[in-house]
Amino acid sequence: MNLINAAATFVGEAQTETGVRCMEMKIPVQGSKAVEVPVFLIPTRSSGETFVPEAYEKGCTILFTGRLYPCKSDNRMYVAPTQPLQTVPNNTVLNQVSLAGGVGFIAEQRREDLFGCGMLCQAPPQKLMNFTWDDSVPLRLDAWGDDATRFRKFIYKGRQIAIGGRLKYESWPGKDGETRTAHKVQVRGGQYTFFGKNT
């Protein structure tokens, strides 16, 4: 499983590295240190006639459901819609990610109240992203507080999990002075299930 349901602000038309037309969106987030989450919608058969960038006014809010496809080469998060796009009131807040897959790695633990790991999900092939059935979708997960404690106790490399969370975007200065960015999924409290044996 690899799905996102979100309401995002339409920024404008953009292109992938290979020249495919896409729609740049920003998912608003709440909080003093929160950074809007940039995502790029790509055209799909499921979105049909609703994928017409010039038909939307910049700044309008669009509701979408789709599959996540992170791209390492341009550091963007692409979304392949699985349903038609829909305009909604500008005050609509929605950012829900549902994932299922296996843990690929466990990040170095720098804080006691934070657990980070990588997850590999499956998704249908996506020709526009050069993504085949043999590829896995790599996503980073963060769990905080009591959830971090449970993850630390029950998660190991290869463990199968299903989670609900929200997509977030982080930006920080690297040691070389260049800005680093990353998309992550923050696990929502209690929205997860572990599969297989505990170790």
Image: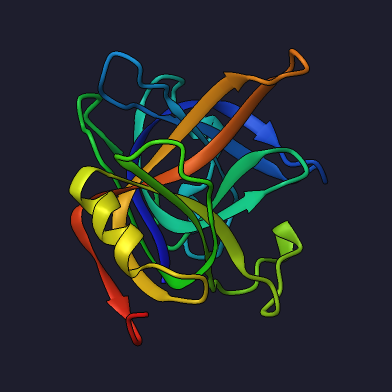
Quick one: 60 or 28, which is closer to the camera?
Answer: 28
- The N terminus is located in which quarter? bottom left
Q: Is residue 83 above or below residue 100?
A: above
Q: Is residue 125 above or below residue 70?
A: below
- Tell me residue 168's x, y (percent): 41, 36
Q: Quadrant of residue 132?
A: bottom right
Residue name at image x 19 percent, y 49 percent: 146
Q: In this orientation, does residue 86 appear?
A: no
Labels in figure, total: 0
Q: Is residue 41 above or below residue 81?
A: above
Residue name at image x 74 percent, y 38 percent: 74
- The C terminus is located in which quarter? bottom left
- Left or right, residue 61 beside residue 13: left
Quick one: 156 or 2, which is closer to the camera?
Answer: 156
Q: In this orientation, does residue 150 appear?
A: yes
Q: Quadrant of residue 172?
A: top right
Quick one: 102 or 166, which is closer to the camera?
Answer: 102
Residue name at image x 80 percent, y 41 percent: 17
- Tell me residue 161's x, y (percent): 36, 72
- Tell me residue 54's x, y (percent): 55, 31
Q: Report the coloring of the rendering.
A: rainbow
Most extreme residue toward the bottom is: 197
